[in-house]
Amino acid sequence: MTIPFNRPVFVSESLKLIRDLVKSNKQINIAGDGYYCGLCEKLLAEKYNTPVLLTSSCTHALEMTAILCDIKPGDEVITPSYTFVSTVLPFESRGADIHFVDIDNLTGNLDLDNLKKIITKKTKVIITVHYAGNSTNMDELVKICKKNKIILIEDAAQAIGSKYNGKLLGTFGDLATLSFHETKNITSGEGGALIVNNKKFLDRAKIIREKGTNRSQFKEGLVDKYSWVDTGSSYILSDLNAAYLYPQLKILEKINKKRIKIVKMYKKFIKIKKPLYFIQTPKFNTFNGHLCALVCLNNKQRQDFISFMKDNGITTPFHYVSLHTSPYMAERNNNNLPGTDKLSECLVRLPLFYKLTKNEVKDVIYYVNKFFNE
Ligand SMILES: *Cc1c(COP(=O)(O)O)cnc(C)c1O
């Protein structure tokens, strides 16, 4: 028996759409910004009640946010250290002065008290990461950003379908990003999206995504030829990928429900004793079932756990090597981030995906309990 950590979502309707697309004699293309991209964007725009642009990855959507914020060398940007590289890379590579904010180690989300301490008059952008599909107190975060005229970006890579006080995560920031990487709740292989809540960014976002050209205005009939008008890159998603994604987007709720059910089973039947704990969902969040993680006593126990599970055929990876300790950043920053260090050293993830079977869930529960209770 082996149980992988993830199996990418696949629904059979995708194959039909891709087959039709490839065979089609209609003027349908398989390049970027095609027919299924349009359908996905329409569904997402209805869901988020604002324009959404499909991108080739969440990393690329985040890169677009850095361009849209006009990040210049020395601009002060605040972001968690406990996140994937992509949250920070687009800002760091434009010369931003990165300040890492700590997280609450019970939820993995931004610690507002720590944030208040490190904000300065020069802070230009805050990126909040909705870790595990949960969030920090968004009312308070939005208030802080408004008061200090700071641009708020939500890295909602893990949070599709999650809510804060009944409102979808991804609708609070000036801009927000989604990921359709194969490890996320729904996937196009590689892929992502930029949610444009602050409409002042919309026209330029469309240009930046299309290699700095006004091709989308041309397609909309607003100009009679298209030309190079700004900076940018190719951040559009191939229509083949969008055709893979579209059927999943239609059944997102069903997929999330299944994941939530698995997480509930894990939490109900896995017996761990304090000070060990599961990553928690705050009361103000409605969870999308993105991730189930438990926090070990220390790094040694985590290592032993991972090898024990591996010996029994079950993959339980950890993440993240915190960015402030990564080889690339370590020399520039030595902030004190205890919450970040705790999860970075002790957190481990359990297998969680749409087609995980009941028996597989039972096996995982059995071996986790065996390790911690025998
Ligand atoms: C997955 C992930 C990303 C990167 O997404 P890609 O689509 O692979 O570029 C960025 N941020 C967070 C928090 C993620 O979990």
Image: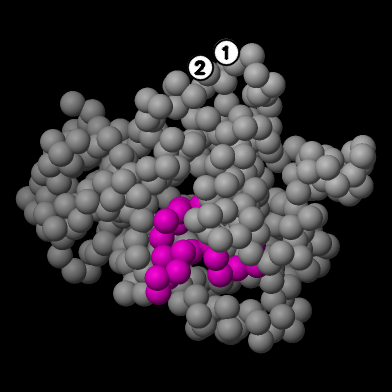
Packing grade of label 1 (10 A; few <14, some 14-19, many >=20) is few
Label 1 within 8 A of ligand 1 by Cβ: no
Whether 41 is drawn above or below 175: the answer is above
Picture disc at residue 23? 1
Camera sees residue 300: no
Q: Mark 2 points at which residue?
A: 19
Asked whether 255 or 47 is in front, the reply is: 47
Q: Is mark 2 on a helix, strand or loop?
A: helix
How many callouts does the rendering have? 2
Camera sees residue 356: yes
* 185 left or right, relative to 275: right
Which span is picked out in magenta? 157-175
* 72 left or right, relative to 187: right
Residue 357: % across, % down = 19, 36
Asked whether 146 or 330 is in front, the reply is: 146
Amino acid type at mark 1:
Lys
Residue 27 image-quadrant placement:
top right
Amino acid type at mark 2:
Arg
| Magenta portion: prevailing SS class | loop
Picture disc at residue 197? none
Please check the rendered image and state whether residue 24 is part of the magenta-colored stretch, yes or no. no
* 54 left or right, relative to 358: right
Packing grade of label 2 (10 A; few <14, some 14-19, many >=20) is few
Q: Is mark 1 on a helix, strand or loop?
A: helix
Residue 257: % across, % down = 28, 50
Pointers 1 and 2 in contact (CB under 8 A)? yes
Whether 74 is drawn above or below 318: the answer is below
Asked whether 100 or 61 is in front, the reply is: 61
Screen quadrant of the N terminus: top left
The residue lying at 31 percent from left, 63 percent from top is: 279
Whether 186 is drawn above or below 189: the answer is below
